[in-house]
Image (cartoon, rainbow, N blue to C red):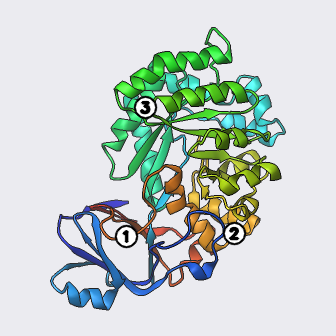
């Protein structure tokens, strides 16, 4: 990958066989493909890293005749908003190859965790890693995401599980964010599991987080989002409810890992007004119906389903119940080591019978809504973050299920060409 700086002047990008701005689409519920705006022979004018104007390239070329032109000599290019990965764990040390070997040999995720593998194994390696080492590992994974057309990446802590190492992780994410044009969104996940070396029960550990760790997170402005894993072997419904309420009082947006192996947690996430409920592989019909009147985003994580060899999130039912559906990678060393958003989204879409527009919405503006930011959309006066594929039909991106890679990703004032 080469990196080219873009000077703070106007530039016109195009012509694109198709330009997909993702404007004017609903935030909730199903989307038909004929609702998608496609600008043929499109172009985009960018000034100081922001979108100045979008339209037909030939008309923009006349209006901005003295503007520097970019990527105007290649046929059959498609431009879309850069993608948003709204759930990752890409700050970690070590690997979990042994876990994978045990899983494919028949052991379950919960059995492996109970035997000392799983999250606890990654905690050990992440605690051992220095902050500098974690920063470099994050940046390596961020660059891989940029090559996949992703410009906005949520990153969780949760492999430190004590004061020193949770703060180390969040500080590493903050430092990495200062060293990349991509937007990194930190989430405090101290409540991933209760660490084996904590002398107390689950409620006591959550109290420790609230009293000892959260104040420093707030003081250093390390995260404004917090997460908790609500599941057998992690944290129960009522202790998670108390924890979530306390975090909201402290000004955090709260999200939850729920329904990964058992139903019930999504009801809690909706009742507590969480910004998102993530995983949802075992969400039942009753819980799906609760999303109908909720602004809690349903985040599907097909990478975890593929990594664990288990069922997908019931995305079609969620959309038909008016949910705002996002799709993210869950990129982590254990259950979701692939980290390829397009491949995962395409496979999930085929399995769950999602329209291509529904799938695209789930990795752009709807994923951004799970983070409560505006991204995944191309609009005047907004940051110019878009990705470019060499094809004459944007549907080819999903048809090839991740094998068609971007030729460039533009993020604000920087262009990465591949």
- The mark that comes first in sequence, 2 or 3, is 3
Q: Residue at x 64, y 77 (%)?
A: 32
Q: How many marks?
A: 3
Q: Position of residue 191 (x, y in %)?
A: 59, 27
Against 66, is 86 above or below? above
Which dot marks residue 170?
Answer: 3
Give the label on residue 354, or none. 2
Q: Position of residue 176 (x, y in %)?
A: 36, 40
* Vertical position of residue 139 compared to residue 172: above or below: below
Q: Is residue 19 above or below residue 46?
A: below
Q: In the rendered structure, are the residues bearing label 1 and label 2 in contact, judged by CB atoms less than 8 Å apart? A: no
Quickly name the residue at label 1.
379
- Residue 289 appearing in the image: yes
Percent of width and height locating residue 229:
65, 33
Q: CA distance from mark 2 to mark 3?
A: 35 Å
Look at the numbered disc 3 and give the secondary structure of its residue.
Answer: helix
- Pick whichever, 200 or 289, lies toward us: 289
- The numbered mark at residue 344 is none
């Amino acid at each position: 990958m080469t990196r080219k700086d873009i000077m703070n002047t106007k530039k016109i990008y195009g012509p694109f066989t198709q330009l997909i701005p993702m404007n004017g689409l609903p935030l909730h519920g199903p989307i038909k493909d004929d609702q998608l705006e496609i600008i043929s022979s499109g172009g985009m004018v960018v000034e100081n890293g922001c979108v100045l104007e979008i339209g037909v390239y030939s008309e923009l070329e006349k209006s901005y005749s003295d503007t520097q032109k970019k990527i105007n000599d290649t046929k059959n290019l498609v431009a879309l908003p850069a993608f948003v990965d709204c759930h990752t764990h890409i700050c970690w040390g070590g690997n979990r190859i042994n876990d994978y070997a045990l899983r494919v040999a028949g052991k379950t995720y919960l059995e492996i965790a109970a035997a000392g593998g799983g999250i606890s194994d990654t905690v050990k390696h992440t605690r051992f890693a220095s902050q500098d080492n974690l920063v470099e590992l994050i940046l390596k994974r961020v660059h891989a995401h940029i090559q996949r057309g992703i410009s906005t990446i949520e990153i969780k802590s949760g492999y430190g599980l004590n004061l020193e190492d949770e703060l180390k992780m969040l500080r590493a994410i903050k430092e990495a964010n200062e060293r990349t044009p991509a937007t990194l969104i930190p989430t405090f996940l101290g409540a991933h599991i209760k660490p084996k070396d904590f002398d107390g029960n689950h409620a006591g550990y959550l109290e420790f987080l609230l009293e000892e760790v959260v104040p420093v997170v707030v003081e250093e402005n390390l995260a404004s989002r917090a997460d908790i894993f609500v599941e057998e072997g992690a944290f129960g419904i009522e202790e998670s409810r108390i924890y979530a309420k306390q975090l909201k009082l402290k000004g955090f947006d709260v999200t939850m890992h729920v329904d990964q192996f058992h139903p019930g947690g999504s009801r809690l996430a909706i009742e507590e007004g969480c910004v998102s409920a993530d995983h949802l592989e075992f969400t039942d019909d009753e819980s799906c119906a609760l999303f109908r009147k909720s602004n809690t985003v349903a985040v599907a994580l097909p990478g975890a389903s593929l990594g664990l060899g288990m069922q997908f999130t019931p995305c079609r039912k969620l959309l038909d119940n008016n949910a705002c559906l996002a799709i993210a990678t869950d990129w982590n060393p254990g259950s979701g080591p692939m980290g390829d958003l397009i491949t995962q989204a395409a496979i999930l879409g085929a399995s769950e019978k999602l329209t291509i527009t529904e799938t695209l919405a789930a990795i752009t503006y709807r994923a951004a809504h799970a983070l409560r930011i505006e991204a995944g959309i191309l609009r005047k006066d907004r940051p110019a973050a878009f990705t470019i594929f060499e094809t004459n039909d944007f549907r080819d991106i999903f048809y090839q299920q991740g094998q068609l890679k971007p030729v460039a990703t533009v993020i604000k004032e920087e262009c990465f060409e591949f």
